[in-house]
Image (tube, grey):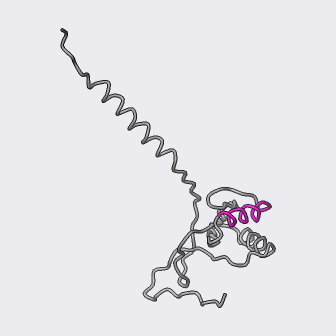
Amino acid sequence: MPEVRFEMTPLIDVMFLLVTYFVFALVLMIRADVIDLTLPDLRAGHTATGTAITVAIGESGTIAVNGETVELERLIEVIRARQEETPEAALLLAFDTRASMGNGLAVVDALMGAGITRFSMVGNPAKSDAAPTRPPETGE
């Protein structure tokens, strides 16, 4: 009767292939859209918490909602869709300090014209010894 052999080499090869597949799948699942913004330093304000819908206005005037570039004409439609998905999300506006003020005003005007009045500005916390201020409590 011939001797029975259990070959481990094919098993190890398959295991390394599976590990490689899962590592690549994990890396490809993470979608990271980055917009290069230089935010202003702010002394007043508070830290945003929870989920957020971020509208970023870049140096060249590009507008992005949560990393997805949109035209000004579609901005309100995209924001409303995101607010339906996550109604508790805060709306945050991030303006690049190198961007034209007109681009920022156009975004704010579009928001106000659509009745969206609850939004916050985003900036870098300025280095100071003073404690950050909290927003006033509203009776809503």
Image location of residue 104, percent across then percent down = 71, 71
- Tell which of 138 and 2 is nearer to you: 2
Image location of residue 108, percent across then percent down = 74, 73
Which span of residues is magenta-colored?
72-85
What residue is rendered at 57% in x and 54% in y?
33
Q: Quadrant for residue 117, please give it.
A: bottom right
Magenta-span inclusion, residue 96: no
The relative height of residue 4 versus residue 20 in the rendered view (above or below) is: above
- Tell which of 116 and 109 is nearer to you: 116
Total labels: the figure holds 0
Residue 35 is left or right of residue 106, and the answer is left
The relative height of residue 126 versus residue 65 in the rendered view (above or below) is: below
Single out the residue that lies furthest toward the front.
Answer: 1
What residue is rendered at 65% in x and 70% in y?
87
What residue is rendered at 45% in x and 84% in y?
128
Single out the residue that lies furthest toward the top.
Answer: 1
- Tell which of 131 and 60 is nearer to you: 131
